[in-house]
Amino acid sequence: MDALCRICCIPAELLAKVPGLGPIIRMCCTSVGQKVLMALTGLALCGFLVTHLSGNLLLFAGEEQFNAYAEKLHSMGPLLKMAEVGLLTIFLAHLGLAISTTAMSRRARLKQYAEKESKQEAFAIPNGGASSWMLLTGLGIGAFVLLHLVDLRFELRPDLDYSSATQDGTDKAYATVHLVLSSPVSFVAYGVALILLGIHLSHGIRSALQSLGVSHPRWDKLIEIGSMLFAWAIALGFLCVLGWVALTG
Amino acid sequence: MSSETLNLTLRVWRQNDPDTPGRFEHYQLNGVSTHMSFLEMLDVLNEQLIESGEEPVAFDHDCREGICGTCSLMINGKAHGPDKATTTCQLHMRRFNDGDTVTIEPWRATAFPVVRDLVVDRSAFDRIISVGGYVSVNTGNAPDGNAIPIAGSQQEVAMDAAACIGCGACVAACKNASAMLFVAAKVSQLAILPQGQLERSERVVSMVTQMDDEGFGSCTNTSECEAACPAEISVSNIARLNREYLRASLCGRD
């Protein structure tokens, strides 16, 4: 692990020599800087979720509109590829930082308490204790993303007949989405993953804003409520799409 | 009316030195007055142990009025016991019931190694302070009061941060053993005031670097520290620390 860290540090050490970048690179090597990067990558992924959900909601508009949207998206060619690579990089950076900060925190307490209880009032624990489950919910979401890519990006699920959703030699996105989401395996896995996403975001967004220093006595309560509403709006939005597609088969 | 005395079973962490593995020992303590403080109860336990020829339990204490930050103790899994805004020395035995088993552990963090029994070495905090938790001023006559105008509201916020007694309960309560609340309080109390401006950027960078070097964990924003803090330091100070650190990294001198 330490050898891996040293290898990862080489580009950082080189970048730190660029005039003006030194303090920023040094910041990224500290616990505070890593949480800032986690916040920025997490919020960027939230931005992606908003665009993804906006696209998915077009399913409600009908087959023609959704297929037109999908074709328009795919016609972007290299731009879409760049966006995919960028998204993957952000996702892997978020995951890497989570593992790095978790490792730091594990090392910080090698001997656990025989008894440990919270001093927060049960109802006041932020987001019902979602913060204790960030790595697990995050890894669950990561596993779901892999399944989702196999299902709909690469269309490699062995138990599904993708040819049934093809018309005139081209994929029809609307039919493919219905084919995948109608499978019981997808329905259950996607449903569980979206609940995990809601739990993850319900702490993640508020925590990201705190890590970026966004806090003010006047606004804190509103930020907390807004973060929670945003988190569950995203999760419920996707769940609605899942439920509707499964019901309409 | 409840009984004025308690019979308790104490489950106390005993450890001879930093390198020897520790273990829990059970002690029966009868006739504990409910008017005693928690530390007085431990004094009585130690008298009992000395009378029976055993080693007394080592624990940190000094002012015994909630100011010095010397006492610590994880009591039934809670830093400084069950009460909010209370140090162990201010905790009264009336908060316990007759027949209770009370588990007493030291703070647990890699950066706070156990010295003996319930005593931990908190010099990591001193080292964090020594790299930046001060203002450099010329010596000489004391400056006139109100020579530097500071708004009352600003003073109040700085004073709230300065209330930190450095006991380490934030580290003890945090699931990551993070010292962010402590460092945030020490950075905030100076960053808010004009006297702290000269060393503002260097201070936050040095203190955060030292905090990491000491082996504290990262902050997951769970607010356990705020709930455990006997001085009720707010986690809004952690947001200020993050802002100060970002500001220093983006705009401070290279």
Image (cartoon, coloured by chain):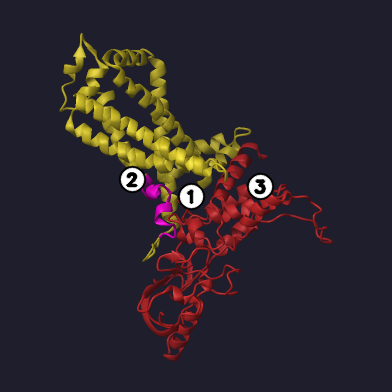
> In which chain is the residue bearing label 2?
A
Residue beneath the point at 41% across and 23% down: A83
Quadrant showing the C terminus of chain B? top right
Question: Does mark 3 fall on the same chain as mark 1?
Answer: yes
Look at chain B in the picture and name its colour. red
Look at chain A in the picture and name its colour. yellow
Q: Main secondary structure of the magenta part?
A: helix
Indicate the amino acid at tag 3: Glu
Residue beneath the point at 45% across and 91% down: B51
- Foreground mark, 1 or 3, reads 1
Task: Identify the residue under disc 1.
Answer: B219
In screen coordinates, is A208 left or right of B152? Answer: left
Task: Identify the residue under disc 2.
Answer: A136
Quadrant showing the N terminus of chain B? bottom left
In screen coordinates, is B11 left or right of A8? Answer: left
What segment carries the magenta color? A118-134
Residue A29 in percent (x, y) is at: 52, 43
Secondary structure of residue under mark 3? helix
